[in-house]
Amino acid sequence: MISKERQHTMGSGGMCICPQCNTTVPHQSGVPCQERRCPECTAKMLRVGSEHHKLWLKKKTSLNKL
Ligand SMILES: [Zn+2]
């Protein structure tokens, strides 16, 4: 799978990313990223590579293009 290669460069355990300020923290197994809060701005975080994260990336990309 192509997506696995990209994830590997970001760490084997996966990452959570803040959609507000792009802060990333290592994903903790057993703790969904969406139940974690960003240490910087307390927003709900997204799992990098998840469907939610892909949708967010799409949104962000289309906004940047405008
Ligand atoms: Zn944040």
Image: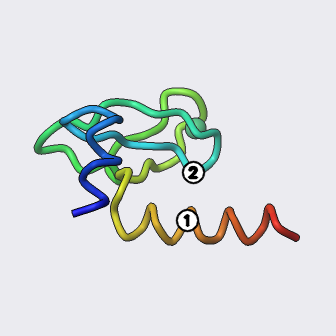
Q: Secondary structure at mark 1?
A: helix
Q: Position of residue 54 (x, y in %)?
A: 46, 66
Q: Which residue is mark 1?
A: 56
Q: Quadrant of the C terminus?
A: bottom right
> At 57% across and 62% down in the image, what residue appears?
57
Q: Amino acid at mark 2?
A: Pro
Q: Are marks 2 and 1 in contact (CB under 8 Å)?
A: yes
Of the pair 11 and 26, the residue shown nearer to us: 11
Where ligand 1 lies, by image quadrant?
top right
Which badge, 2 or 1, comes first in the chain's sequence? 2
Q: CA distance from mark 2 to mark 1?
A: 7 Å
Q: Which residue is mark 2?
A: 19
Q: Position of residue 62 (x, y in %)?
A: 73, 71
Q: Quadrant of residue 23?
A: top right
Q: Position of residue 26 (x, y in %)?
A: 31, 31
Q: Quadrant of residue 63?
A: bottom right
The vertical placement of 57 against 9, above or below, is: below
Confirm or reject: label 2 Cβ below 8 Å from ligand 1: yes
| Neighbour tally class for label 1: few under 14, some 14-19, many 20 plus, Cα within 10 Å | some
> At 38% across and 51% down in the image, what residue appears?
48
Q: Quadrant of the N terminus?
A: bottom left
Please indicate whether residue 24 sits to the left or right of residue 58 in the image.
left
Please indicate whether residue 13 sits to the left or right of residue 35 in the image.
left
